[in-house]
Image (cartoon, helix red, strand yellow):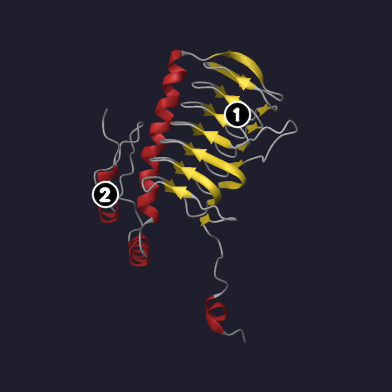
Amino acid sequence: MNGGIGGIFGEVSRHRTLMNIFDKAPVVDKDAFVAPSASIVGDVWVGRSSSIWYGCVLRGDVNSVSIGTGTNIQDNSLVHVAKSNLSGRVLPTIIGNNVTIGHSVVLHGCTVEDEAFVGMGATLLDGVVVEKNAMVAAGALVRQNTRIPCGEVWGGNPAKFLRKLTDEEIAFISQSALNYSNLARVHEAENAKDFDEIEFEKVLRKKFARRDEEYDSMLGVVRETPPELILPDNILADKAPKAA
């Protein structure tokens, strides 16, 4: 029979959301959200109100990763760096403010400037620069050292210029970043629940077969979230973004 705590309760997870490497440690702002299944390793800086979602890996080992304020890195995305390219150029990964990085994106030794948008499943290779208010379409492969100018949409494999962004699309990029900052507060509150709260909710789910108003009020759930993702009053109201 296996002895010790591991033998009684099974193997304990060794997953570490934040991990040092060499002499480098991640620096994450206290108002940022990092999902418990994400991995942030080494020389990585995450700014205020940014969110790192489930399954993401940000690895700053041979160089640094910097993420500004209000930026979201969505589920299963990978952010890594290059020590240098063939010409000796140092290639950290720099992501600006209010940037949206879609699900399952790969960013490697590149720069994404403020209020840019990278669609789901896109790959940005070493030396790429996505300028402010530019958009990379879903599934695009952006080759090394490509610069995507402000206000343009690029897509395809390899990525090429498709068209100019409309004013409505540029406004959408900013709104998308704000939506994710608000949504992160809801996930943060749920992840902060302790064991007793979670077990109590399990009991309620068994007791109430129907999801009615009484059930919702006991859980403190608001099921009809408005499109702009305004936070419920009972969810971290003190951390809600202040109106400009």
Farthest residue in the right direction? Answer: 86
Residue 233: x, y in percent?
24, 44
Find out whether the residues at labels 1 and 2 contact each other: C-beta distance under 8 Å: no
- Mark 1 is on which residue type? Ala
Q: Within 10 Å of the Cα at label 2, are there few (<14), some (14-19), or many (20+) other Cα atoms?
A: few
The quarter of the rendered structure image containing the C terminus is top left
| Residue placed under numbered mark 1 in the picture | 138
Residue 126: x, y in percent?
67, 32
Q: In which quarter of the image is residue 155?
A: top right
Local SS, label 1: loop
Q: Which residue appears at 58% of the width and 33% of the height? A: 120
The quarter of the rendered structure image containing the N terminus is bottom right
Residue 143: x, y in percent?
70, 27
Local SS, label 2: helix
Q: Quadrant of residue 6?
A: bottom right
Farthest residue in the bottom direction? Answer: 1
Q: Which residue appears at 53% of the width and 21% of the height? A: 134
Question: What's the distance in space between the residues labelled 1 and 2, CA to CA?
Answer: 39 Å
Q: Which residue appears at 45% of the width and 25% of the height? A: 173
Foreground residue among 98 and 9 = 98
| Residue placed under numbered mark 2 in the picture | 213
* Residue 110 badge: none
81 is higher (above) or lower (below) than 190: above
Q: In which quarter of the image is residue 243?
A: top left
- Mark 2 is on which residue type? Glu
Q: Within 10 Å of the Cα at label 1, are there few (<14), some (14-19), or many (20+) other Cα atoms?
A: many
Of badges 1 and 2, nearer the viewer stands 1
Foreground residue among 57 and 224 = 57
